Image: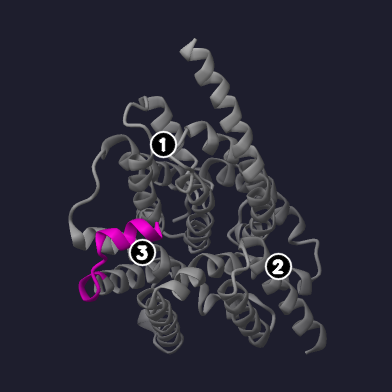
């Protein structure tokens, strides 16, 4: 009897996940289209774009990966940049490990890990009590196909659309990045300062790259790695996060 | 040297999956080291900020429209617009700017 109750609950959780995944999927579709434009510039075919997005479900990570591909950079650089850019998922995965029932079997942990995106993590971590993995599965069932299809259509249609439209759509991805970093900046002065400093240093490094041939040879991805590690480490030393603060913000 | 696209995708997928799944399967306690904890906490904000600017200005046909998208995006996100609304606002302002400039 306990088993049937649990499976009934799993179905309910799955349905709730799908419901909450619909607006996320719609957002993903628009952003993925813009990601597809970046993928096309890097030389991916529609199928390769679909495959990448279906397997990975990570906007910033994929975008950074496409810059690595566009630069024809070494495989090792792909591994390093993916590791650094997706470091936040590491943190989210840590947080989720505290949110699920400690008895959760391994196969659920392996699956749940795969569905961690910024948005699905966000809705999953805010569930009451222990997180039922089926809720997160429900959200990804709708959102992931939107993401993969959007990327593919971006690659196909990106070249068919007039330049003005492509130009407009190509900022959608950055808009999504802003939607992730700005609201916490409003709550935390530290993050606000961090974002401004990151903007400035990134601008400076790019400026120096345009005037110095040595820096110009550093790929886009490597610049991102250097800046991320240096700025985050400096921030961690200057302003260590208190444990409670982090839990509240995560 | 040219690289195989599928090997790139495979490395990207494998690394991303490892990053996502390892803590969930292996670490059952919270990370105690304060430096690592703080570093990991700041990483997403820095990464996304660095990737957004100045790239957003170079993504559009004219730098001015990219700058307008940045400003509108910040304002929209600041006043609580969600992912979809912020992204659409940015696209829309670029469209308007490039229509008239």
> Label 2 marks which chain's residue?
B
Q: Name the residue nearer the viewer: B18 or B38.
A: B38
Q: Is residue A139 magenta?
A: no
Dominant secondary-structure state across the stretch colored magenta: helix
Quarter-wise, where is residue B100 in the image? bottom right
Residue lying at 58% horizontally and 64% vertically, measured from the top left: A176
> In the depicted view, which residue is nearer to us: A162 or A131?
A131
**Residue at mark 2 to residue at mark 3: CA–CA distance:** 26 Å
Instruction: Confirm whether residue A140 shows in the render.
Output: yes
Q: Which residue is mark 2?
A: B88
Residue located beneath label 1 in the image = A130
Segment colored magenta: A236-250
| Callouts 2 and 3 close, C-beta under 8 Å | no
- Mark 3 or mark 1, which is nearer to you? 1
Q: Secondary structure at mark 2?
A: helix
Q: Kindly state the secondary structure of the residue where label 3 is placed.
A: helix
The answer for which chain carries disc 3 is B
Question: Where is residue B44 shown, x and y percent of the image?
Answer: 41, 63
Pointers 3 and 1 in contact (C-beta within 8 Å): no
Residue B32 location (% of width, % of height): 19, 52
- Residue A147 x %, y %: 63, 48
**Residue carrying label 3:** B43
Q: Is residue A249 inside the magenta stretch?
A: yes
């Amino acid at each position: 009897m306990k088993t049937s109750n649990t499976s009934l609950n799993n179905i309910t959780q799955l349905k709730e996940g799908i419901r909450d995944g619909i607006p996320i999927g719609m957002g993903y579709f628009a952003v993925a289209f813009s990601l597809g434009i970046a993928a096309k510039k890097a030389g991916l075919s529609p199928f390769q774009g679909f495959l990448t997005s279906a397997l990975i479900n990570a906007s910033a990570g994929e975008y950074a990966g496409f810059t690595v591909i566009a630069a024809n950079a070494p495989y090792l650089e792909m591994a390093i940049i993916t590791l650094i850019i997706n470091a936040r998922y590491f943190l989210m995965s840590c947080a989720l490990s505290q949110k699920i029932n400690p008895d959760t079997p391994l196969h659920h942990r392996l699956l749940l890990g795969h569905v961690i995106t910024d948005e699905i993590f966000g809705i999953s971590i805010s569930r009451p009590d222990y997180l039922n993995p089926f809720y997160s599965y429900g959200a990804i069932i709708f959102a992931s196909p939107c993401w993969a299809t959007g990327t593919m259509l971006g690659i196909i249609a990106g070249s068919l659309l007039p330049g003005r439209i492509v130009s407009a759509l190509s900022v959608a991805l950055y808009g999504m990045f802003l939607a992730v970093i700005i609201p916490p900046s409003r709550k935390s002065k530290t993050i606000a300062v961090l974002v401004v400093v990151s903007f400035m240093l990134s601008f400076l490094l790019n400026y120096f790259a345009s005037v110095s041939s040595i820096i110009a040879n550093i790929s886009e991805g490597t610049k991102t790695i250097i800046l991320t590690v240096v700025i985050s480490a400096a921030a961690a030393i200057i302003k260590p996060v208190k444990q409670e603060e982090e839990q509240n913000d995560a | 040297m040219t690289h195989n696209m599928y090997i790139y995708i495979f490395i990207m997928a494998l690394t991303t999956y490892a990053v996502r799944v390892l803590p969930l399967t292996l670490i059952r306690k919270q990370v105690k080291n304060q430096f690592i904890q703080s570093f990991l906490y700041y990483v997403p904000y820095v990464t996304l900020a660095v990737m957004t600017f100045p790239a957003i200005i170079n993504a559009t046909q004219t730098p001015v429209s990219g700058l307008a998208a940045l400003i509108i995006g910040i304002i929209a996100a600041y006043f609580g617009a969600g992912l979809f609304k912020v992204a659409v606002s940015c696209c829309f302002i670029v469209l308007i700017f490039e229509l008239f400039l």
